[in-house]
Image: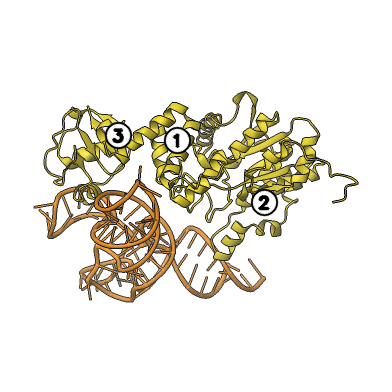
Chain colours: A yellow, B orange
Amino acid sequence: MSDAVSPSPTHPSLAQLVGGTSKVLSEKELDEKLKEGRPLRIKFGVDPTAPDIHLGHTVPLEKLRQFQELGHHAILLIGDFTATVGDPTGRSTARPPLTREEVLSNAETYTDQAFKVLDREKTEIVFNGEWFRQMNYEQVLKLNARVTLQQMLQREDFKERVAKGTEVRLHELQYPIMQGWDSVELQSDVEIGGTDQLFNMLVGRDLQKEEGQAQQSVICMPLLEGLDGVKKMSKSAHNYIGVNEPPIEMFGKLMSISDELMDRYYLLLLGQARDASLHPMESKKELARLIVTRYHSEEEGHAARADWETRFSKRDLNAADLPEIAADSLQGNVLEVVSQVFRDVFEIEKSNGELRKQFITTGAIQLDGERLIDATVAFEGSAGQILRLSKKQSVRLS
RNA sequence: GGGUAGGUGGCCGAGUGGUUAAAGGCGGCAGACUGUAAAUCUGCUCACGAAAGUGUACGUUGGUUCGAAUCCAUCCCUACCCA
């Protein structure tokens, strides 16, 4: 660098906005937009395919909030229309279509939860059915004419499905086009999405260009792995932590992740590296506490940690905060009672065979520490006793 | 439209007339050990039943047979090649 002309400094908020992203397209372009000094229109789209938001969704939402805090205009796009198509991104099979009713009710709970992260007052909510439901076939064809099959087939997920011989249905090819068109309708300046959304977001740029709009900048956030540490966090993989989950549950789930995953969660959910000088378990407890704090409250964070410790470190179930069930509602033999508790308290249906073979005979079922290994004997429990169903599931009789 | 290969339990994948509720793997669950981590070990993994057993199940429907996931027909579905 010569000292003749110093490079113009980047916008003061650029560094923060770029932090934690996995890809920004491009930083320079974003910088220029920021320098315009106006509130930018930031688009983040969600498909309400499931009623609950989990921690994986919060990664881009956090980014959206950052923009919001800096005075930009956050647009939460609800893909009520696209959800009925199903995003093929990363899928190895076509998504089962949802009915409109399902989608709308999902959308409602979805936005409620998103506002645990976003500022409700400053967020614009838009449904893409607004424009898509009014399009006619002619307009659809026109849109389709702008994208080639070859472009679509460059996508890894489609390519793979074609190579493996799994079906790809034509409506799935529409998805990126629709997502791109959303950007045109919204005149977005920036779109935030997971790294898997890169292609779809780029289609948005193409379409905006053809419509004579400025092209949106694209920010990709890393994908959060689920509890298993392998698959992306998702409801369908049953490896998620919902932002609506009660503190104790949330804490417990976080404690069950692997050490490797913990580092990742620190980075993506808290935006910090974990303190390597701490014992991994201590780090994990702090991670769990901080996340509970974020979605519930400071006190509940501390309470969840304290409860977890009495429950698992000290193995003192008596002092733990357990779900309760009335002792006199538990009639019948051990098998029947255990089945009932699983159903009523934990909302899990288990077959008698499973309960017998895996829970009762193995000694998982304990009443005040005493193993109940005979399924046929009548259950006798009284108020105050602790019925343990498994290592992680216990109830207090009342 | 023609040809070929296929459709098996949550997934992958053996099985080509009875010994098959169906090998093996993955995943999942319970237990032991632990830090509700990882790794490891044990057991389980269609339903009912204490068990013997019974019911249901190998794309659909029907048939052959004492007996079918396995043979035949029918229909549905998928991929690949050709048009």
Position in image of residue A271 (x %, y %): 57, 41
* Residue type beneath disc 2: Phe
Q: Chain of mark 1?
A: A
x 22%, y 34%: residue: A386
Circles 1, 2 touching at the beta carbon (< 8 Å): no
* Residue type beneath disc 3: Val
x 52%, y 43%: residue: A266
Circles 2, 3 touching at the beta carbon (< 8 Å): no
- In the displayed structure, would residue A190 be above or below residue A112? below
**Residue A58 appears in the rendering:** yes
Q: In this rendering, which labeled residue sits more in front, label 1 or label 2?
A: 1
Location of mark 3 (residue): A345
- In the displayed structure, would residue B17 be above or below residue A176? below
**Residue A129 appears in the rendering:** no
The earlier-in-sequence mark between 1 and 2 is 2
Quadrant in the rendering for residue A213: top right
Circles 1, 3 touching at the beta carbon (< 8 Å): no
Residue nearest the observer in this picture, A189 or B68: A189
* Residue type beneath disc 1: Arg
Compute the Cα span from label 1 to label 2.
36 Å
x 45%, y 49%: residue: A237
- In the displayed structure, would residue A252 be above or below residue B57? above
Compute the Cα span from label 1 to label 3.
25 Å
Q: How many marks?
A: 3
Q: Which mark is residue A44?
A: none
Location of mark 2 (residue): A199
Residue nearest the observer in this picture, A61 or B14: A61
Dot 1 surroundings within 10 Å: few (below 14), some, or many (20 or more)?
Answer: many
